[in-house]
Image (cartoon, rainbow, N blue to C red):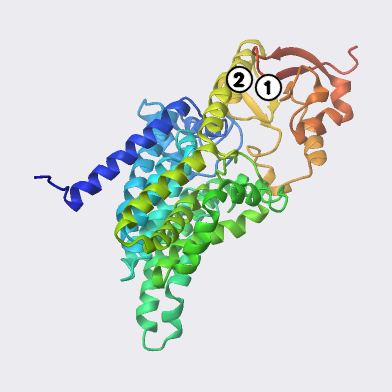
Amino acid sequence: MRRELSPRAAGFALDALNLVIFCAFLWPVRKFVTDDAYITLRHAERLALGDGFVWNAGGPRCEGFSNPLFFAIEALATWLGLDGMQAARVVSVLCSFALLVAMRRMGARVVGERAAAAAAFLMAASAPFAFWTVSGLETAMVVLVVTAGALELGREDGGRAWRAGWIFAMLPWLRPEGPVPALALAFVSEAFGLLDPTRRRAALTRFGQIAGPVIVSSAILEALRWGIYGHLLPNSAVLKMANAEIGEVTLPFLIQIAPAGALSFAGALLLRGRARLIIIPAFVWLVGSLRAWNNVNDFGRFLLPTVPAWLLVAAFGLDAAAAFAERRRAWVVGIATASLALAFAAWPTVSSRKVADFAQTYVRCRAVVRANAGIWLAEHAPAGSVYAMVDAGLIPYNAGGTALDTIALNDPRIQQTGALSWKDRAAVVMADRPDFILLASDSDAAEDARYAIDQAVVAHPDFARFYRPEAHIRTDDCMYHLPIYRRIAEGSP
């Protein structure tokens, strides 16, 4: 006599399967750490070592990171004698595990058990999600917070508003734009109740329970930010929104999730009641991304927190379409979900092979060159030297000393100047007269500089006048080069 698994045991089995699948996607990218993660780590280590809230030891206070919670985690880990970067990565992996469980369990009360299980499976098989989980950035925690809060409010009974509020209260500490989708969801969640005199009081209470913690959390963060740094927006917010071209983040992301596009559209139309709330943060983020700068955004990082919502809605549409199969509905959903996972795995912009190849090339190419450049500076730059570069993560982390971030992410002066044109920013850099300038390039020639700011620096008349090649950092079979230029004395040949 065959024994069937109890629903509880079946749920545990599905969660275990998803974790195994996710770990399989994590393995090929396990060594990847993005360069920007070292920016937060450098700030955290400066604080942990007693230098204060600075970028350069002995320099002015500076907020070049955009994730205060991860900054705090890394600073605490460093102070305790642990590896701050590994602490951040472990937290991210645990958040990813929690997300997969939350999507299936919490999602079941919003889109149904089959749709929630299918969406969790698709998320587990997401190569971009695995890629950014180990990056050292806050992405995985943002995905968890947004998804868990939205699913709590998307329940037919309205969920526990206070719980959603305290979940969303973490967002200001993870992303500068975090409070916006949270507050938008709070408003939409209670909008109809606020318009109904008979329900207005209860709706106001719920709205306060959701929005209140977010507002208080944001106020505390802004008070700390003003007290420590003297401004209300981190440097990243000042820089990135001012340098954007319309749609450069949005359109690639829409192409990236295209395999689920029709199903997401159908599911969004078929959702009823409060279940439709899960799509609100995704919609707000999508609109906000229209003016976002496509910086550190490989494989859709900026909009990755919205992916679970799109997958849940797509899976709901798939389950609704499979209803015509009646008794074989579960089999139809299962086969269709597996097919959709394979479609994502082979999709050109986010295929598992492309993501894994990118991560491995990044580790053995860019990361090695940057680490070696930092080591070269530490060994050859005279004490007190100032060096300038765009990729301000691993290079200054290894070099120590005084670094000048040419795009101004780690330059406190951006709070007064705002984000300048690259030509004007290059003039600021050259006026600082750094002792060394590193140019990210496709060769050892300055003319092949990769970034617009480096091109503007090379075009500045003082570059040809005062800077001469000093070293060329590269590795075999790597198109990423870091030629190093040294400032010469005025009047030198």
Question: In the rendered structure, are the residues bearing label 1 and label 2 in contact, judged by CB atoms less than 8 Å apart?
Answer: yes
Q: In which quarter of the image is the N terminus?
A: top left
Ranked by sequence position, the earlier of labels 1 and 2 is 2
153 w.r.t. 463: above or below = below
Residue 480 has which mark?
Answer: 1
**In the displayed structure image, the side of residue 253 where residue 137 appears, left or right:** left
Query: What residue did someone put label 2 on?
Result: 365
Mark 1: which amino acid?
A: Tyr
Q: How far apart are marks 1 and 2 (CA)?
A: 7 Å
Q: Which of 191 and 105 is in front in this view?
A: 105
Work out whether 70 lies above or below 185. above
Residue 275 x/y as whole percent: 40, 67
Amino acid of disc 2: Cys
Which of the 4 image quarters holds residue 165?
bottom left
Instruction: Answer yes or no: is residue 413 visible.
Output: yes
* Residue toward you, 184 or 38: 184
> Residue at point 66% right, 10% down?
380
Q: How far from the left and from the top, in percent, is residue 282?
A: 51, 58
**Where is residue 346 drawn, in percent x and y?**
53, 37
Mark linked to residue 125: none
Q: In what element is the residue under mark 1? A: loop
